[in-house]
Image: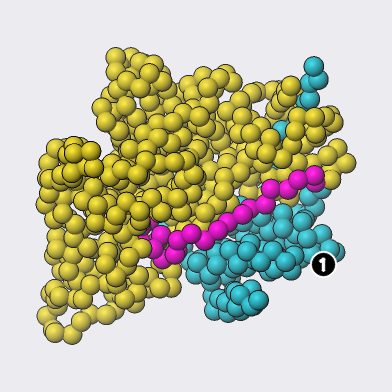
């Protein structure tokens, strides 16, 4: 039987902050206080089991170095618990449960895990074991598939959000509706993602083809089987918060599949490293395409379904996606800054409605965590083969800065639309703004 | 029934870490300029730069003394502090290449290239990739 006790290296808050930044020369003292972090240790245990049998771990004093961050953990726990307590009063959200996974982009380090509202209880770990429909969290995979075909699709490509119907192999008709039950006509591709339009996404997914979509989903790092049905575009797949974190990790890491790791090393009493768990990455998507996708995911937070972040987390650039499933059974938000990524899920164990959308529920918990703990906003300098062009936000045609409705959008070089709208007093195209943006 | 006690050490502070004091603040010339500045930015980014330089020097020392695993760990710690710094990934790529780990070397070199490196680092990364592609 494996009994894991956490000897928390207790540091006061200031020291802990600087210890986070300065791994050298920090002396720590254990004050014997032991608090349990069962959800995080659960992941540690599972990852250890891949390399160690219980009998291998028989010597006392074996040290397992993890990426656990107690400050982030405490914030994640209190933010989730606060939301759940607040919802307890309303009928729909009594018995609300939740999970949080916090990871670090680019390294895959898992820094905090919350498995449910009772954080001290080593019970059902929803972060790792709850399998829930992910709804709109799947949409970035659809738009990524499109953007990879940069000759055909850019953020400025118009897509139709008219009513959509599809005949299924079994004879039924699938007719997904938008959340607001409206048809939005022709919209720019980035807006369809930012506003999470179901009709446009279902239509786009059909154009791209199921095989393409499933391939992108796999490349993103989703290892669970997802059903090969059109509704996959709207997230008719059951994944755990950990699966979702792994998927978004590929996006937050610039297109590099970055396996999530709780353990960094196992060390024996003499200080010898028995097993080391190095950072391991694999290029799966072009970083320019991911940069372009990321712009749309930032638009989610500026004008789209997570625009509440403009006042919940002001002046701090992040990207992310809300997820709401049918009948509001699941409320999700997955998002990241340069130094932190978090996936938050809210739902009921009996799968009844929560009364919460991704935006009114999970997003709030997420914003609390980032407000307290995130330090590096997204750095937005475009990579070498991406340039910014001004686009007419209604029609998607090339425009100029200062023209009505003109917005800047990033494009993989060569894919930007021709400039058709000119509003300068001379015929000469004004190039200076491009140099500024470079 | 045997009970095995394992101490889980948080914050990943290694027992054998050198206790070098951070040197005077140094701005890292290879970091691309940020458009947005983070909260508490000046203080933290200055601290980060000096720790970054220390870690890179440490990894060089470790590599020179044959401790390749240690050098890798130092570079990984550097990544945690400066996850968008192309030089660190490039060094990790070279370290992996010297250990014959071609796939990892390739991935880290590609990662370095994806982070807007200056022309010197770009050339270095591209040469490494060319070298790795040779049979």
Q: Residue at x 57, y 28 (%)?
A: A39
Q: Which chain is yellow?
A: A
Q: Secondary structure at mark 1?
A: helix
The answer to whether A324 is drawn above or below residue B109 in the figure is above
Relative placement, left or right, of A344 versus A104 is left
Q: Quadrant of residue A418?
A: bottom left
Q: Extreme front residue here? A: A170
Q: Residue at x 40, y 31 (%)?
A: A132
List x then y, in percent, for residue A15. 66, 39
Q: Residue at x 66, y 55 (%)?
A: B76
- In the picture, which quadrant includes the N terminus of chain A? top right
Relative placement, left or right, of B48 versus B38 is right
Please name whichever residue, A367 or A58, is drawn nearer the observer in this view of the structure: A58
**Which color mode does the image show?**
by chain
List x then y, in percent, for residue A357. 29, 32
Q: Chain of mark 1?
A: B
Q: Which chain is cyan?
A: B
List x then y, in percent, for residue A269. 86, 37
The answer to whether B122 is drawn above or below residue A141 in the figure is below
Say which residue label 1 marks: B64
Q: Quadrant of residue A8?
A: top right
Please name whichever residue, A433 or A226, is drawn nearer the observer in this view of the structure: A226
List x then y, in percent, for residue A335. 41, 45
- In the picture, which quadrant includes the C terminus of chain A? bottom left
User: Is residue A231 visible to us here?
Assistant: yes
Please name whichever residue, A391 or B103, is drawn nearer the observer in this view of the structure: B103
Q: Is residue A94 magenta?
A: no
Q: Residue at x 73, y 48 (%)?
A: A276
Relative placement, left or right, of A27 versus B78 is right
- Magenta stretch? A273-299
User: Is residue A338 visible to us here?
Assistant: no
């Amino acid at each position: 039987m494996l009994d894991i006790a956490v000897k928390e290296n207790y540091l006061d808050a200031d020291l802990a902050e600087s210890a986070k930044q300065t791994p050298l020369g920090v002396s720590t003292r254990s004050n014997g206080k032991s608090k349990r972090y069962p959800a995080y240790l659960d992941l540690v245990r599972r990852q250890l089991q891949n390399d160690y049998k219980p009998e291998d771990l028989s010597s006392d004093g074996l040290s397992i170095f993890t990426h656990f961050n107690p400050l982030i953990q405490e914030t994640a726990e209190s933010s989730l618990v606060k939301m759940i307590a607040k919802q307890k009063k309303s009928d729909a959200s009594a018995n609300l449960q939740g999970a949080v996974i916090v990871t670090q982009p680019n390294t895959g380090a898992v820094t905090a895990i919350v498995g449910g509202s009772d954080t001290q209880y080593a019970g059902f770990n929803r972060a790792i074991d709850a399998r829930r429909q992910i709804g709109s969290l799947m949409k970035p995979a659809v738009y990524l598939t499109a953007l990879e075909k940069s000759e055909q699709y850019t953020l400025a490509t118009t897509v139709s959000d008219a009513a959509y119907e599809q005949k299924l192999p079994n004879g039924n008709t699938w007719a997904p509706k938008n959340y607001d039950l409206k048809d939005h006509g022709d919209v720019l591709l980035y807006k369809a993602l930012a506003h999470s339009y179901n009709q446009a996404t279902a239509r786009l997914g059909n154009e791209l083809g199921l095989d393409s979509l499933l391939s992108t989903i796999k490349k993103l790092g989703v290892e669970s089987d997802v059903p090969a049905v059109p509704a996959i575009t709207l997230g008719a797949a059951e994944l755990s918060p950990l699966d979702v974190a792994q998927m978004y990790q590929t996006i937050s890491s610039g297109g590099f599949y970055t396996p999530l790791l709780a353990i960094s090393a196992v060390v024996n009493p003499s200080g010898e490293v028995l097993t080391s768990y190095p950072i391991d990455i694999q290029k799966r998507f072009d970083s320019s395409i991911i940069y372009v996708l990321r712009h749309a995911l930032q638009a989610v937070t500026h004008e789209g379904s997570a625009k509440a972040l403009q006042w919940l987390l002001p002046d701090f650039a992040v990207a992310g996606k809300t997820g709401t499933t049918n009948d509001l059974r699941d409320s999700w938000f997955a998002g990241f800054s340069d130094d932190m990524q978090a996936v938050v899920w809210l739902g009921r164990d009996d799968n009844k409605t929560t009364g919460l959308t991704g935006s009114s529920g999970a997003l709030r918990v997420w914003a609390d965590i980032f407000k307290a703990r995130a330090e590096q906003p997204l750095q937005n300098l475009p990579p070498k083969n991406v340039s910014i062009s001004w686009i007419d936000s209604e029609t998607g045609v090339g425009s100029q800065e200062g023209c009505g409705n003109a917005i800047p959008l990033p494009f993989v070089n060569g894919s930007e639309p021709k400039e058709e709208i000119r509003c300068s007093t001379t015929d000469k195209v004004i190039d200076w703004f491009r140099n500024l943006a470079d | 029934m045997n009970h095995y006690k394992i101490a889980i050490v948080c914050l990943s502070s290694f027992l054998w870490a050198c206790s070098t004091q951070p040197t005077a603040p140094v701005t890292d010339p290879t970091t691309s300029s940020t458009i947005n500045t983070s909260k508490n930015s000046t203080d933290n980014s200055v601290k980060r730069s000096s720790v970054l330089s220390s870690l890179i020097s440490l990894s060089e020392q470790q590599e020179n003394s044959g401790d390749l695993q240690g050098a890798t760990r130092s570079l990984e710690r550097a990544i945690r502090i400066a996850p968008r710094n192309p030089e660190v990934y490039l060094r990790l790529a070279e370290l992996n290449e010297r250990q014959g780990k071609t796939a990892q070397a390739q991935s880290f070199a590609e990662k370095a290239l994806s982070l807007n490196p200056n022309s010197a680092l770009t050339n270095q990364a591209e040469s490494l990739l060319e070298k790795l592609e040779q049979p």
